[in-house]
Image: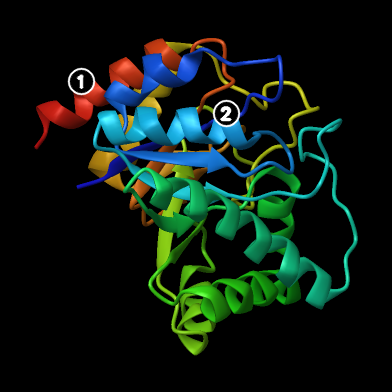
Amino acid sequence: MIKLNSDLGEGFGNWSNDSDSKIMPYIDMANLACGFHAGDPMTMTKAISEAKKNSITIGAHPGYQDLLGFGRRSIEHEFEELKALIIYQIGALRALAQSLNYDINYVKPHGALYNDMMKHEEIYKTILEAISSYDKNLKLMILSSSKNEQYSSLAKEFEIGVIYEAFADRAYSDDGFLVLRKEKGALLHSVKDILKRVQELVEFGYIRSINGKKLALKVDTICVHGDNSEALEIAKAIRRYLDSIK
């Protein structure tokens, strides 16, 4: 059964996003910011508590250390430095979770780090190495694409399982990658249109690119972004649909 996930816990300091408590009842998995692109100890603790209350699986959502850019700008790192950056964030979220008698189950990189992981094999392998050296039981969530077998094979070398993800509210390019946010039409808002593409994905195994090309995808989970202005209505609609086909 395909699960619904969302990127949450993305407040910081005096700025808070009140969508977490509203969205969590409708999702299965919450990807929680770990303090580098968003999130702070109290924001993380509150998000974990909310996830626990709703019996939601949680994962670490590490990104580049870029609060001003919300982690959407690539930052060049030496591989050992990047490895430490990943472990640091995973460990922070796990420590807070365990203090609440809860735990994390997977890792999903955020923003530019997610995109870089999918485009640069060395970055992907560095993230795998970081997770493997910390806890081989944690899975890595990646963008489902035509290169699934290649990415899965690399993950096996590090004894890490992968979770294949597709995006409900993001446009795809014809080559199967996400359209850059700065481009027109990159973020989708129509609940009706998003639900239709989710239905096609679940029932027929493909998602349409921004130009209408059918992209065949193997999918374990579908993401709705918590910072989408229509996130709550989108999550509700997809939840009703997924529940109807159980």
Q: Looking at the picture, tell me which residue is in the foreground, 192 or 131.
A: 131
Write the residue at 50% across / 54% down: 95
Residue situated furthest bottom in the rendering: 157
Residue 244, quarter of the rendered image:
top left
**How many labels were placed on the picture?**
2
Residue situated furthest front in the rendering: 99
Residue 208 drawn at (x, y percent):
49, 37
| Residue 160 sits above or below residue 25 on the image | below
Q: Looking at the picture, tell me which residue is in the foreground, 229 or 88.
A: 88
| Residue 90 sits above or below residue 153 on the image | above
Disc assigned to residue 240:
1
Write the residue at 39% across / 10% down: 233
Q: Residues within 10 Å of mark 1 (few under 14, many from 20)?
A: few
Disc assigned to residue 118:
none
Q: Looking at the picture, tell me which residue is in the foreground, 56 or 121.
A: 56
Q: Looking at the picture, tell me which residue is in the foreground, 26 or 18.
A: 18
Of pointers 2 and 1, the one earlier in the residue sequence: 2
Residue 55 drawn at (x, y percent):
24, 37
Residue 16, quarter of the rendered image:
top right
Q: In the rendered view, does 58 fall on the left or right side of 79? A: left
Write the residue at 42% across / 67% down: 138
Write the residue at 56% across / 20% down: 188
Residue under pointer 2 = 43
Locate the C terminus and report the quarter of the image it occupies: top left
| Residue 171 sits above or below residue 156 on the image | above
Residue 224 in sight here: no
